[in-house]
Amino acid sequence: MSPPDTSNSTGEKEAGETDPSILLNDSLGSYPPGFHSDITKHLGVQIILISAYSLIILLGLLGNSLVIYMIVRYKNMRTVTNFFIANLALADLLVNTLCLPFTLVYTLLDEWKFGAVLCHMVPFAQALSVHVSILTLTVIALERYRCIVFHLGRRLTWCSSLLIMAITWTMSAVLAAPLAVFSEYRNEEIPSINLRMAVCSEKWPHGSNRDGLIYSLSMLLLQYIVPLAIISYAYICIWVKLKNHVSPSSRNESINRRKKTTKMLALVVVVFAFCWLPFHVFQ
C-alpha cells in the first residue's frame, strides 16, 4: 500500500485550515518557552488553588478570631496558657492576612504585582509569624513543665506573661529581619519576546546563595529542631509525671483536666511540626 499523497496538504491548510500549534500559541500569548509548562497555569489547577487558599484564609480568620474573642470575652478563659494560645492565634492571623493572599496571586500570575514595600514586608511577616508560633509553643511547654513536674503552684503573673510575649515578638522580628533586608523588587526584561516582568526574590550580599543557605540552615536549627526537641522533652516528662501520679479522689478532676489540656497541646505541637517540616526543608 502506497503512502497517502500529501503534496497539496500545505495548500489546503493555507486555504482553509489553521495549524493547531498556531492556535495554541495565540491562546497562550507570547511567553518564554516552558512558561506554560508550569502546572499552576492550567485552569483546573488554578481553580483548585483559589478554592483551597480561600477556604484556608476564611477558616483561619474565623477560627483564630473566635479564639481571641473567647479568651478576651470570658474571665474564666483568661489563664496564662490561654493567653499564650491567643498569641498563637494572633500569629496565625498575620499569616492569613499578610501572607496567603499575596502568595496565591504571585503563584498564579508569576509576577509580583504589589510593589517594592510589600516585597520586603510579606516575607518578613511570614517568617515573623512562624517564629512567634514556635517560640510560643516552646514557652507553653516549659510553663506546663515547670508547674506540673516541679509542683509549682505559683503560675506566671500577667506582667510576666506580657514580658515573655514581648520578648518572643522581638526575638522573632530580629530572626526574620534578614528576609526584609535582603529581598529585592526588580523588573526583568526578556528582549526576545519584548516582555517585562516584576519579580520579588531574595538577594543576598555579594550575589552568592551561600549566605541564604547558611540563614536557612540556621533557622532550621534554631526555629525547628531545637524548639521541637525542648517541647518533646517537656511533654514526655509531663506525660510520665501524670501517668505515675497517684492523687486523692478529691483531686482527680484537676488531674484529669490537666491531662486533657496537655494532650491537646501536644497534638497542636505534632500537627505544627508535621505541617511546617516541608517549609523548613525546602527553604
Image: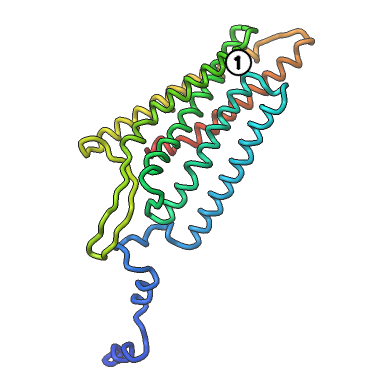
Residue at position x 65%, y 7% in the image: 153
Q: Quadrant of the N terminus?
A: bottom left
Residue at position x 60%, y 12% in the image: 157
Residue at position x 55%, y 13% in the image: 160
Left-right relation of 174 to 89: left
Is 179 or 224 nearer to us in this picture? 179
Left-right relation of 74 to 223: right
- Relative to 101, say whether 250 is above or below: above
- Relative to 242, say whether 127 is above or below: below
Q: What residue type is labelled 1?
A: Trp
> How many numbered callouts?
1
Q: Where is residue 229 in the image (x, y as percent from the top left)?
A: 47, 21
- Relative to 132, say whether 115 is above or below: below
Left-right relation of 124 to 213: right
Q: Where is residue 149 in the image (x, y as percent from the top left)?
A: 59, 10
For the residue labelled by badge 1, is the local secondary structure a helix, a strand or a loop? Answer: helix
In which quadrant of the rendered view does residue 68 lie? Answer: top right
State the scheme by which the image is colored: rainbow
In which quadrant of the rendered view does residue 126 lie? Answer: top left
Q: Is residue 275 visible?
A: yes
Residue at position x 42%, y 52% in the image: 107
The residue most toward the right is: 250
Q: How crowded is mark 1: few (under 14 residues within 10 Å), some or many (20 or more)?
A: few
Q: Is residue 2 visible?
A: no
The residue most toward the left is: 206
Q: Where is residue 252 in the image (x, y as percent from the top left)?
A: 75, 14
Is 153 or 69 nearer to us in this picture? 69
Which residue, given by chain and number where applicable, does mark 1 sit on? 158
Q: Position of residue 71 (x, y in %)?
A: 67, 27
- Relative to 155, say whether 6 is above or below: below
